Image (cartoon, rainbow, N blue to C red):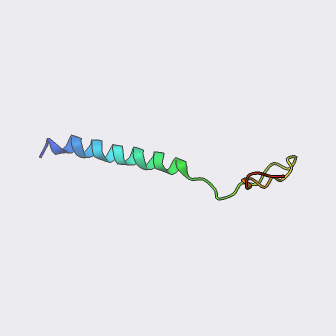
Amino acid sequence: MRRRAPFAVFAALCLALSAGIAGCGKKPAFVDPPEEVETDEFPRTYPTS
């Protein structure tokens, strides 16, 4: 049973690290453009004329 303790600690550290990294990918659904930039309807259909 002494042999499993280091593996359990290693597995717990790996899970904690991967959970922290997975949380970095969260993105908001919409981001307002800066005030000095004109609102652009992107993406738009091609071609625009």
Residue 24 pos. (x, y %): 53, 47
- Point out the residue furthest to the bottom here: 29
Q: Is residue 48 left or right of residue 6?
A: right
- Point out the residue furthest to the left here: 1
Residue 43 pos. (x, y %): 72, 53
**Number of numbered discs present?**
0
Q: Who's the residue at 84% across and 52% down the image? A: 49
Residue 6 pos. (x, y %): 22, 40
Residue 7, image quadrant? top left
Residue 32 pos. (x, y %): 76, 54
Q: Who's the residue at 14% across and 41% down the image? A: 3
Q: Who's the residue at 20% across and 44% down the image? A: 5
Q: Is residue 32 left or right of residue 23?
A: right
